[in-house]
Amino acid sequence: MNLVVREALLAFKRAPLLSALSVTTIAFSLFVLGLFGLVAVNLQNALRSVAERVEIVAYLLPGTPIEATAIGLKDIEAFPEVQTAMYVSEEEALSRARAELVEFRDVLRELERNPLPASIEVKLKPTFRDAAHVTAVAERLRSFGFVDDVRFGRDWVEKLDRLRQLAAAVGIAVGAAFAAVAIIIIGTTIRMAVLQRSREIAIMRLVGATDGFIRRPFLLQGAIKGLLGGLVAVGLSFAAYALIDRYLIQAAFFTREQAAAIVGFGALIGLLGSATSVGRHLKRV
Amino acid sequence: MIKFTNVFKAFPKGGLALKDVSFHIAKGEFAFLTGHSGAGKSTVLKLIYAEERPTSGAVRVSGYSVTEMRPRDVPQLRRRLGIVFQDFRLLEDRTAEENVAFALEVTGARRSTIAARVMRVLTQVGLAAKAQAYPRELSGGEQQRVAIARALVNEPTVLLADEPTGNLDERATRGVFQLLRDINASGTAVAMATHDLDLVRQAPYRVIELQEGALVYDSAVDEPRDQAAAP
């Protein structure tokens, strides 16, 4: 077996308690980060499903010939922001109103003439569902000759925008704080492991070990600890998710990539934590 | 081999650990470094194995200038030296054999040759039968023998020993000292710091005496003196 790998694994064998303790510490600090991540992911999903309801409705002038509407519809569908554009005829609008506005059923039934205009309902692609793009598309729709009026719930879209910005800001701040806490705790844990072996490091140097030779097993060991801690953290997060999903509210778990990112983050901090504490230690001795 | 020329060494917090120390230890020589605790014996050894750098003056050790060498060359120098301490400095969680093998592994020695070389030095120090023992299972004298084996396994030209018998009883002291004499007899230079004057008197070796950081007596240069009057 490679010497570096052997030395790194021997450290686990020699100090099983301390190793288990560091892995556990890393796991729990990443677990806290993971829980926050779960909240963020689910909040984002919720916002996305709300944003799906962002819709622009262009009401058409009465008597617009269907040919003109069809050409206009094609143009609108070609807008880069537009996902779907759907024509709703006057009759369709009325039957929808009958189905949806149950309280007014009697009024609607007794109508002699359909008062509802035909319309084009436009949905934007997910990345364009914010106030600025919605307003811009609405303006462009307004410029069509056969369009009478455009509605899109400006207040609502703007509120959604603010909510999204708030969620992003809070997410970044809290996420960064949790990540910093995880980095500090993991760094300290790894540092303890290095200090515990300072005598050994001093002896290695006396017999002529180069700094690189001393460092490499520590780096590998730190990365392994971070990796194990990350795996445990993802496992714990999944357990938490499963409980919440079953007993509280329907929730989503990380994608495979996100879970891998947590494990990778653990390994990276383990590696960097080892690199800095061994480096500092080697410089001091 | 080892050459100190007008070496001064300041303590980091002021004061001098060594004052104008000059001497030369030749290839194959055995030299005692004597003096009271704090006289500067360990500092001299630390300068030799480049744990410390001189504040001024020149220290040359088997072709390296300790004064000017780059940190990355220090391991190369140490592989040419064998170092033994009062407190043995063995890795507690490795067997005698693994402790000795470790000194070879760090040099990148070929795996296939390590086991044989380790057994050869363990045999040389009389511990072949205890190769699988951990330091805690060995007596002080035996632990020091493992440390000496570790120091020898890279076939050093100089063996540095800092109070190697300081923690040992009389019998173990005699054994370890005899081992160092045998090692010297086979051509390795030995620089041994000690304040055990009985040992010094037992052998006809060179004596370099330090007092408060200054070299006050060198039997290779100065007149022989009445040993009874020595401190």
Image (tube, coloured by chain):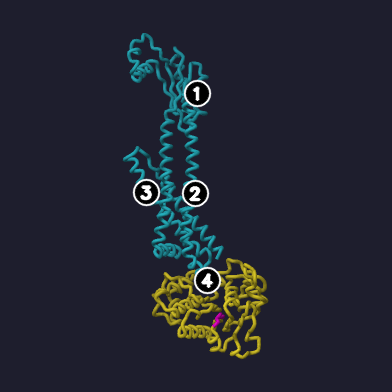
Tell me: residue B40, above or below residue A147.
below
Q: Which residue is labeled 1 in the image?
A: A138
Can I make out residue A155 in this image?
yes
Magenta segment main secondary structure: strand
| Chain letter belonging to callout 1 | A
Same subunit under labels 3 and 2? yes
Residue B147 % position (x, y) = 47, 76
Same subunit under labels 4 and 3? yes
Kindly report the distance in space between the C-alpha atoms of the residues bearing marks 4 and 2.
36 Å
Secondary element at tag 1: helix
Q: Which residue is labeled 3 in the image?
A: A236
Q: Nearer the viewer, mark 4 or mark 3?
A: 3
Amino acid at dot 4: Leu
Residue B207 occupies quadrant: bottom right
Amino acid at dot 3: Leu
Q: Nearer the viewer, residue A73 or B164?
A: B164
Tell me: residue A159, above or below residue B2.
above
Residue B169 % position (x, y) = 46, 83
Sequence-earlier tag: 4 or 3: 4
Q: Which residue is labeled 2 in the image?
A: A180
Judged left or right of residue A99, residue B53 is right
The chain coloured cyan in the image = A
Kindly report the distance in space between the C-alpha atoms of the residues bearing marks 1 and 3.
47 Å
Amino acid at dot 1: Ala
Q: Which residue is labeled 4 in the image?
A: A206
Residue B222 % position (x, y) = 66, 87
Secondary element at tag 3: helix
| Chain letter belonging to callout 4 | A
Q: Nearer the viewer, mark 1 or mark 3?
A: 3
Kindly report the distance in space between the C-alpha atoms of the residues bearing marks 1 and 2.
43 Å
